[in-house]
Image (cartoon, helix red, strand yellow):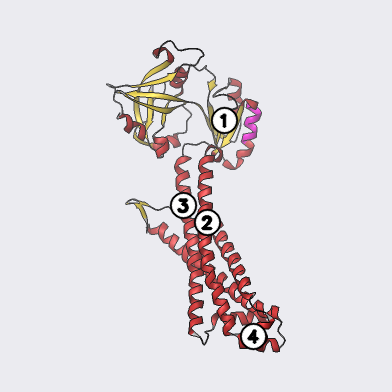
Amino acid sequence: MNVSFYIAKRYLFSKSSNNAINFITIIAAIGVIIGSASLFIVLSGFAGLKDFSLEFSTIVDPDLKVLAAKGKSFELTQEDIKHINDLEDISSFSKVIEERVILNFEGKNIITTLKGVDKNYPKSTIDSIMVQGQWFEANTDQIVAGWGVSNNLSFGVFDYAKTIKIYAPKPGKGQVSSVKGAFNSVNATNSGVFQINETLDNSYVFANIETVKYLLNYKENQVSAIEVQLKNPKNLAIVKQQLLEVLGDKVIIKNRIQLNDALYKMLNTENLAVYLIFTLVLIIALFNVIGSIIMMILDKKQNLHTLFNLGATVKDIRNVFFLQGGLMTIIGGALGLLLGFIIIWLQKMFGLLMITPSLPYPVSVKVINFLIVFATISFLGLAASKIASGRITKNLIIAS
């Protein structure tokens, strides 16, 4: 066994004759354990919150979304549809028309996004978002409104006595002679209410694609987008290339992450900020490790003099305390990770911390967080040990 490592291990696990040094060493070890546990808990909590947020934002997002490269729409011919149907990796695809419209009900107005979808819109998505009523029937002017839209305009489900007026600006150029002549309108009935997240609930309304096509004066083959579901998401890049070959440069294709790039950037930025803040806390805690090693050096000055006389070099003696600090941070970091994992597991199993009476704070255990915490604590601990052991000089040893 390496002599420096053996002595470092003895110094770390054996008691000193000076109780103050024992107390400082214990405080330093506890600081490392709590620091690494805290960092792991915060990262796991943020990972859970991130998954929770993205779960609701992507529930209505397709695997791939085909959008117009220029303008708001593009033409999808029957030949294009045939070629897309021939692609084996595509489970289903739905034609979509989206536009901002005005909803009017009983004198109240609200601007929302009207999303027209065809009969191929995934039933799994429909079933997962509906909370009241039912999905609209084909070939009708029924709509399905978000929970927030329904509340803001105070309409319910299947109220045939009071219809909802939908206004969409007529396409064209030049001056508008009258307000009535500037809009197409449809009288609709709300058949159901969906709930996804606050943003979508307050701004989205689903309708038949034919209704939206009429409102916007779209041609038969004109669409805003195509939403594609894949049999195997692993083949996403292959299908994306195939769709580009079929539809050409008139379209651009985005995956789930690209559709929510602003949300992903915000969450990743917040995650980085939280990591840096708690790393700073960890750095402050590791000052205890530096202090503990320096105190140990001063306590063992006589022993260092003996080691030097026996032939140990200054570098060998420095390695003793460098390894002692390294062992303290690595072992403390591992124990902290274990403690953090136990707390996260208890939260997942028993919901120790609740956001609401029925919703526990979301947490997620990810391997990457284990690696990040362990790498961080190891690097900072070794740096602290290097700084502390660098205090040993030949003059300090001889002066002993």
Given contact means CB atoms under 8 Å apart, are the residues at marks 4 and 3 in contact? no
Given contact means CB atoms under 8 Å apart, are the residues at marks 3 and 2 in contact? no
Q: Is residue 145 above or below residue 325?
A: above
Disc 4 versus disc 3: distance between alpha carbons? 50 Å
Q: From the image, tell me which residue sits under label 1.
A: 66
Disc 3 versus disc 2: distance between alpha carbons? 15 Å
First reached walking from the N terminus: tag 2 or tag 4:
2
First reached walking from the N terminus: tag 2 or tag 1:
1
Label 3: few (<14), some (14–19) or many (≥20) C-alpha neighbours in 10 Å: some
Select label 4 or label 3 by which is in front: 4
Given contact means CB atoms under 8 Å apart, are the residues at marks 1 and 4 in contact? no
Q: Say which amino acid is labelled 3.
A: Gly
Q: From the image, tell me which residue sits under label 2.
A: 275
- Disc ID at residue 48: 3
Extent of the magenta region: 239-248
Q: From the image, tell me which residue sits under label 4.
A: 304
Nearer-the-camera pick, 212 or 180: 180
Disc 1 versus disc 4: distance between alpha carbons? 72 Å
Let me know if residue 245 is in the magenta part: yes
In the image, taking residue 183 as reference, residue 273 lies left or right, namely: right
- The quadrant in which residue 194 appears is top left
Q: Is residue 112 above or below residue 288?
A: above
Q: Say which amino acid is labelled 2.
A: Tyr
Disc 2 versus disc 4: distance between alpha carbons? 39 Å
In the image, taking residue 98 as reference, residue 241 lies left or right, namely: right
First reached walking from the N terminus: tag 4 or tag 3:
3
Q: Whole-percent x and y of residue 101?
A: 42, 24
